[in-house]
Image (cartoon, helix red, strand yellow):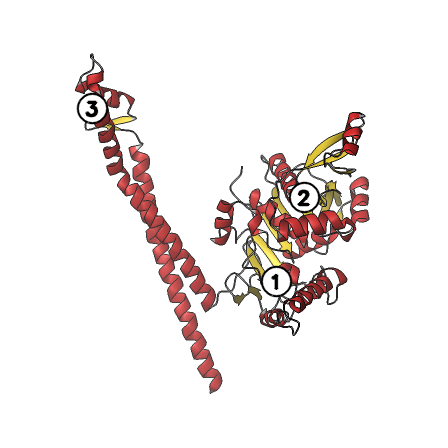
Amino acid sequence: MNTKTDIPNLSDEDYFSLSQNTYSEKKMKSAYENKTPLVNGSKKAFYVDKIKKDPDTGLDVYVFVQAKKKEGKWIKPKEPENVVVGFQGTNQEQLKADIISADGGNVVMGIDPKKKVKYIMKKDAPRHSKAIAKYNGSMEQALLLKSGKYKIVTKTSQFDQGDQVVAHEVKKYANAKTVISTTGHSLGGADAEYAGVNNNVYSVAFNNPSIVKLHDEETQKKIRNGEFDLYHKSIINPDDMVGTGWLLEYDRHNGTTIYTKDPSVSRKERIKRFISPLGIPGVLGNLMTSFYGQAFAKNPDTHSLNDSNFKFDKNGNIQSVDGRNGVYNQNIESFSSFSGMNGQTIKVDEKYAKELAKRLQAAIEDLKTKKQVIERFPHDHSKMIYDVKSTCGKRLEEFKDLAPGDVDDAVLFHARSVKDGVAVFYDLEEHYQTEATLHYLIRDLEDINEFMVKMANDLKEKDGELANWLKV
């Protein structure tokens, strides 16, 4: 699997537009069947290349291929610049599959997305079509199977199915310069993040719940260490209980969480939901009423993909909906003009600089630990050879025709190389180069870290000077 995540040259607004399109099923079907491109506000066009659905699991996926112009007309290239896999969010028409199984089972309860479920369906029905029912082994279902007109099909969750769709696109364009990415809103955004992390592709999601716990323990550790922060972005209205957490505020999403306004008021409202003269039943009533109102009744509408919840600057980068400069980076609890992970400007304040310095110092300490292990390796290697010779030497009496020198000869024979008469089982040059590289890398990172600390202190000093000046 490709371990390098490419960053596409698409804006937040481009992903917003594609996520909106996933809810327009008739429009998508028409674009797919008639092979007509969808043109967005930034004058980019996309063809609907594939539509994948499964009514039993709630899967609704559209594969968008970026079009290009040739002689003034849009065409679908064999090697497109971008391919975006768009996931539709919760569909109330698929109440059981989306809201109960995916939203409730996977997102809330953390049920394994790869868990297999058996369904019974007509023998000639396509695998991802609507099943008659879940297989339960009843006498009635046994008779259906015995008739030869029905079959049992095993399906996983829409998270795992979507993961497989993205994996297929990654494999399809493995030898091309095409950049794969994912997007979606609400449950669709969670699908996009899950598949994005698993397939090492970029993702932008809107008002999506956190699904960190759906990943394996190793991936969860990487998420919490911030290893995916540059490649996965959750753009969240802090008033929205789906995107921020229906009970307590989410600790984090898979990557960087961007709030579209100052979350302080939203956090106060969250606290109010836990206050009720009716005790726990009253609190649960408050939570359920607020969640249903936002997610489904749209009263207030904090969840939808609309201009009141998401605004963009002239370049298509997300911006605050309340008129502030910059957006709120929840990962570092600070405002910054974080416009994207695609080479655009990131405003750095004192808090941001200190957080960067802290993370950089942690990386330096980790590299130092690795360097110590590498430096110690020749000693460990020599001890290993000594232990092997010692163990074999103690057993020589079991073999009539072997002498102590035969053990030395055997070790030298199997060694990768011999230096000064000593067996060496590793590449000396590669070891030297690795040790030297780490030495200079640590030195350079320490210089950068020193600069970051100084920058944070300078920013604090300049803020102080500005405050004094404003008092004059």
Q: Is residue 99 visible?
A: yes
Q: Nearer the viewer, residue 345 or 70?
A: 345
Q: Left or right: 212 with respect to 464?
A: right
Spatial separation of the CA atoms under disc 2 and disc 1: 24 Å
**Residue lying at 54% horizontally and 63% vertically, measured from the top left:** 329
Residue 158 - label: 2
Residue 468 - label: none
| Residue 235 locus on image (x, y percent) | 62, 59
Look at the numbered disc 2 and give the secondary structure of its residue: helix
Q: Residues within 10 Å of mark 1 (few under 14, many from 20)?
A: some
Q: Left or right: 203 with respect to 305?
A: left
Labels 2, 3: front one: 3
Residue bearing the label numbered 3: 394
Q: Earlier in the sequence, mark 2 or mark 3?
A: 2
Residue 327 against residue 209 in the figure, above or below: below
Q: Residues within 10 Å of mark 2 (few under 14, many from 20)?
A: many
| Residue 131 locus on image (x, y percent) | 77, 37
Q: Earlier in the sequence, mark 1 or mark 3?
A: 1
| Residue found at the far bottom of this picture | 472
Q: Left or right: 390 with respect to 359?
A: left
Spatial separation of the CA atoms under disc 1 and disc 3: 66 Å
Q: Nearer the viewer, residue 321 or 87?
A: 87
Q: Left or right: 144 with respect to 415?
A: right
Residue 84 against residue 239 in the figure, above or below: above
Place residue 207 in its image quadrant.
Answer: bottom right
Which amino acid type corresponds to the residue marked 2 in the rendered image? Gln
Which amino acid type corresponds to the residue marked 3 in the rendered image? Lys
Look at the numbered disc 3 and give the secondary structure of its residue: helix
Residue bearing the label numbered 1: 247
**Residue lying at 48% horizontally and 67% vertically, measured from the top left:** 349
